[in-house]
Image (tube, helix red, strand yellow):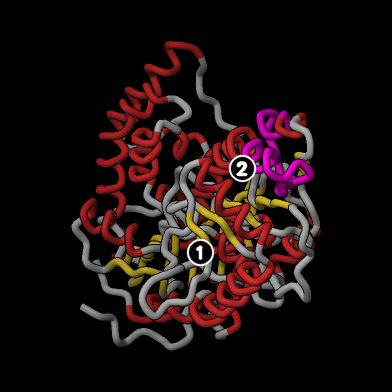
Amino acid sequence: MPLNNLPAKMNILMLSATFPYPPTRGGTSVRTFNLLKYLKQQNHRITLATHRSEDVTDDEIAALEGWVDCLAVFSRPAGSEQTGAFGKVERLANFALGGTPPNVITTRSDEMQSWVDRQIASGDFDAITCEHSVNEVYVPDDIGRYIPKSVVNIHSSVYGTCAHQLAGGTAEKPWRDRLNLPLLKRYEQRYCQKFSDLVVTTAEDKQQMTALSGKESISVIPNGVDLDMFTPRSQDPGGHALVFIGAMDNLPNIDAVTFLARDIFPLVQQAYPQATLSLVGARPTPAVKALQEIPHVEVTGKVPEMTPYLHNSTVCVIPMRTGYGIKNKTLEAMAAGIPVVASDRGLEGLTIEGKGIPLRALRANTAAEYAAAIGRLFDSAELRQKLAENGREMIEEEFTWAIAGSRYEQILLNATRV
């Protein structure tokens, strides 16, 4: 039943294994930060527990403290999994018996767990949120006894992502994932039951999570864009410059940029020999760095701002082949007023064409389709301008963090008891 007797201004405990600052880190960080920022601006009291990885600075911690009422930062565990055949068998056996994936177990902090346990037992909180499903490991099955509202902001289904990677041939270790798939399904079904409400980013995710969990209290809250950070460009630079933005240690992004640089870009260069490609994002892996050996391909590494790279490029290409959920990179490119060519995965959760819908992006899924769509945009300033204007308008109307934050707040205010 609805919890109608809860205060309009809540005391919220938020858990985020990923350090959510600065929001330019992308991915989980940008969603978590902007939702907590909105809640804080509505005068809710925010207590945040998070991990600190090696690249988090003291200045970033100090800055994040300004956005919350209480910040607890814990060192991110390095993980101590055994290697070799025996270690693989042991991890699989532990997963089968314990029900929790090895990557969740090995990155769980005992120190953070003890701290969270004390906060839960205090009875001080009106709501608890897990900002990404991996944080569910810190929440007990009987959380409803201590905190009336419990929300897991899933971001994307781990089972669904694994199944899609296997089906699309993009799994990093197919043999492992085939063994893990039924265990991941069981894990997702189990952990969802302890939360009063589930939050996902797309209607497709909701359909999948409904089938998996059997729960009705599942809400769709798309990602948003900071419109002050991603401003529309003042003029079209023309030329033949392509750009991709995103964290370069993320497996779906690694697959996307490899496909872009090695399969799509050579086709583009056949028609436009002077074309360039910029791969912009932090923490490029060796495989990503190797792509800069291709003529006219640049791998930037971490940059202060993404917006200048978007503004100075002709087209943003988002050839995602795996990964569920709405893509920040797609929303940010559209907000910056750059025309987008993207895959079905890159455009998930967005209506970009149809009856009564102005064309907002070009869709492609094969290398040939990408090359053709990019060529259309290279050759038509009018088409570039139309996509840029329509894309920005869609973001302003449907995908701001104010809209997302307001929906999240309402879920917290109206969540149901397990």
* In the depicted structure, whether residue 14 falls above or below residue 409: above
Magenta highlight on residue 266: yes
Which of the image's four quarters has the C terminus?
Answer: bottom left
Residue 400 rendering spot, x and y as whole percentages: 55, 76
Report the front residue among 162 and 127.
Answer: 162
* In the depicted structure, whether residue 193 falls above or below residue 180: below
Quarter of the image where one finds residue 149: bottom left
Residue linked to disc 1: 14
Residue 293 rendering spot, x and y as whole percentages: 77, 29
Q: SS class of the residue under badge 1?
A: strand
Residue linked to disc 2: 76
**Which residue: 46% across, 55% down?**
132
Please give left or right for residue 162 compared with residue 298 in the image.
Answer: left
The span shown in magenta is: 265-290
Between disc 1 and disc 2, whose residue precedes?
1
Please give left or right for residue 270 compared with residue 222 in the image.
Answer: right
Report the front residue among 343 and 88.
Answer: 343
Residue type at mark 2: give it.
Arg
- Cβ–Cβ below 8 Å for labels 1 and 2? no
Q: Is residue 11 visible?
A: no
Quarter of the image where one finds residue 184: top left
Q: Is residue 393 visible?
A: yes
Q: Label for residue 272?
A: none
Please give left or right for residue 152 compared with residue 210 in the image.
Answer: right
**Which residue: 41% across, 86% down?**
7
Residue type at mark 1: give it.
Met
Magenta highlight on residue 307: no
- CA gap between label 1 and label 2 equals 17 Å
